[in-house]
Image (cartoon, coloured by chain):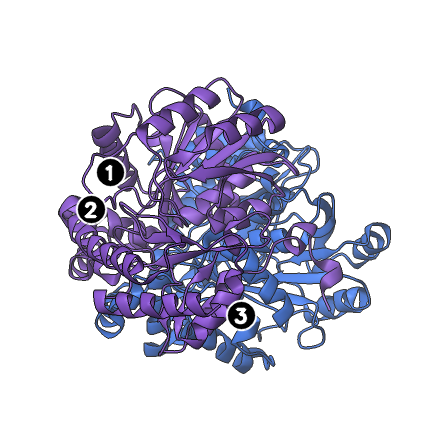
Chain colours: A purple, B blue
Amino acid sequence: MFEQYFSERIKNTPSSFIREILKVTQNHEIISFAGGLPNPISFPQEELKISMNRIAEKYGAKIYQYSTTAGLNSLREFIVDRYKKLWKMNITIENVIITTGSQQALDLIGKVFINDGDNILVEKPSYLGLLQAFCMYRANFIPTKLNEDGLDIEDLKNNLKLYKPKLAYLIPNFQNPTGLTYTKDNRNKVFQEIRDENLILIQDDPYGELRFEDGERIPYIGLNETEKNIYLGSFSKIVTPGMRLGYIIANKEIIKMIETAKQASDLHSNIFGQYLISDYLYNNDLDKHIEKIKKLYKTQANAMVKSMEEYFPKNIKYTHPKGGMFTWVTLPEGSDVLKLFDKAIEKKVAFVPGHPFYVKPDKVNTLRLNYTNADEQTIETGIKRLAESINEI
Amino acid sequence: MFEQYFSERIKNTPSSFIREILKVTQNHEIISFAGGLPNPISFPQEELKISMNRIAEKYGAKIYQYSTTAGLNSLREFIVDRYKKLWKMNITIENVIITTGSQQALDLIGKVFINDGDNILVEKPSYLGLLQAFCMYRANFIPTKLNEDGLDIEDLKNNLKLYKPKLAYLIPNFQNPTGLTYTKDNRNKVFQEIRDENLILIQDDPYGELRFEDGERIPYIGLNETEKNIYLGSFSKIVTPGMRLGYIIANKEIIKMIETAKQASDLHSNIFGQYLISDYLYNNDLDKHIEKIKKLYKTQANAMVKSMEEYFPKNIKYTHPKGGMFTWVTLPEGSDVLKLFDKAIEKKVAFVPGHPFYVKPDKVNTLRLNYTNADEQTIETGIKRLAESINEI
């Protein structure tokens, strides 16, 4: 009835594949690896309860009033201090803006940078939330191959030369959906290729803190070597996603433009949540809390990989995540993952078919598995069912 | 340095006039009528503290986890019940989506409906947050004259005929910035003009609950007579703006599209805040709480009008608000309100010059005054200073 009124951008946005999937998986007998939810262990509930009562006492009406678009200064300062400590970044709070979750960071970046048809380089596969957000600004995506060690340098070179993309969006740590991490060497090579291009690089890093295998944190691509980097971070995977609090770190000129866009988008992010998270962060040991999450996710990831090794046919490939929340499975060339999906639902196990992570999904033979919301026994049972499904298609 | 990268839409968005104004008014000696903040009396702090502890007990991890894009069902049900009771609307929760404040509602409507250059009918003057939000989608605004009794019907007729606007955005109750309210008769006339047009009417109503003068609530334009109406509401002025919770009521087909846009914008609104406000609403008497706010605002508005009557020169016009938070002052034709602003700051009183409320601000002789954040004595002193400033320019 309203077709004639809707904008071109919304008519060209694919409706959410994942939501449809999740409807099917509501059935309680189904073991679901389809979600992307952090384990509730990552919410420090007792500490947050103490904090909420403390901020109510301490700040009174302020936690309920309108506030500034850029975000609560104490929270921005916490981020500045942490990135200075971890990465020796030379930043102040003017380089930081609080967003309504990382998803809003993507929307605001789209608003501020993308004109209709602008070329935007993304990983193949890429984060579906990014594809949705930039689709609204009518981006022309340039998918670039992802390998075990990071971005495919030849494909990157070709795409830079052919399309001169304005922005690139990468998730270098424990990528969603693949679980892959760029090696240090790959990051250096990527930076060599892009450093002289007219390209702004967005590095989204919701999972960086969740490295559960040994080995040091690997520095961001071009860290401290360029002003053309934008870093995204989030409290969703380490404190709570329900508060919808993420942030952008970038050059002040960029942050100022994003602030204008944010003012037009939601004025400011929930200020109660900002006071709450800030109070929690200053009064608790975040690193100790993160250790707890990492320990659990490591157990779960190992259980999933071990089960896949044991039960999957040998021609099935999968990633070995060193952190984050996902692993990525590749069926033999020519397999139809949607056929597998139907069979798997029959056998009461669910996953996300690869489709929503591709710009042009076509003959998809990949799928994403989440391991953070099931115990080891359930993971084994689920993977066994999935292996049986694979054998039967 | 980044000029070449920014999008056309953001380069064409005026930077916020109000933020600049507010910087000047930080000085504590200045009496400021420039803000737009609700009085803290409207935040039921004690009750919210009880509610936050109750939801933490009752729902545990759920108040911190990811949630659905459309919003918390119990909150949507509260809205359905209230609009059914007040307006006999025939709606279900599928007609309601929760937004990150009303500002996000405007952004999402822009996303879902506006193509570059679409004609959008707005009041003259209009709400500046709407102008900013739709500017991002490159709307072509069609300002339509506002009179004491509502929209100017002749101007409306002409604009409908000439520009065939796709959307109209109106604030029929206690408008921001003017404080004006459309009469019942004017609403009927407006509906007669638009009912057969291909036009979707957005009625934004953040202040409707704050009618402090006698007289019944006046029904919305075209209430229950068309599917082409979109209603916006908010908890910002009656419970708390800091939680950033507003809502849209519309036809299900429209709500579904807005849901897709919201998913790409911030996934969902802060779920903790939704549980909190929902718990507050079901366990307290909202109407009794609103009475308290209205009583205070009535006293403040009356103090301001009385002072203006007493101290302003007779050639100064101003509106007599029957609700809401603002009054609108018109200086004699040809006066320069920016000159008055400088003089007023000298005399330590501040207001918002009319500029940001116009699509094409030019020779502006109007200004907005807010009365909700000062006591009667302060209001009188501030208006006296303003009157002196007027006399001296």
The secondary element bearing badge 2 is classed as: helix
**Residue that badge 2 annotates:** A281
In this orientation, which residue lies closer to the viewer: A178 or B317? A178
**Residue that badge 3 annotates:** B96
Q: Quadrant of residue A225?
A: top left
Determine if marks 3 and 1 fall on one subunit. Answer: no
**Residue that badge 1 annotates:** A78
Q: Residue B392's x, y, as percent?
A: 55, 29
The secondary element bearing badge 3 is classed as: strand
Give the residue type at disc 3. Answer: Val
How far apart marks 3 and 2 lie (CA) works out to 35 Å
Chain letter of mark 1 equals: A
Left or right: A245 in relation to A120: left
Q: Residue A387's x, y, as percent?
A: 37, 65
Q: Is residue B308 at all visible to an observer of this figure?
A: no
Chain letter of mark 3 equals: B
Q: In which quarter of the image is the C terminus of chain B?
A: top right
Question: Is A142 located above or below residue B115 in the figure?
Answer: above
Q: Which residue lies most toward the front here?
A: A314
Question: Is A246 located above or below residue B231 in the figure?
Answer: above
Determine if marks 1 and 2 fall on one subunit. Answer: yes
How far apart marks 3 and 1 lie (CA) works out to 37 Å
Label 3 environment density (alpha carbons within 10 Å; few <14, some 14–19, many ≥20): many
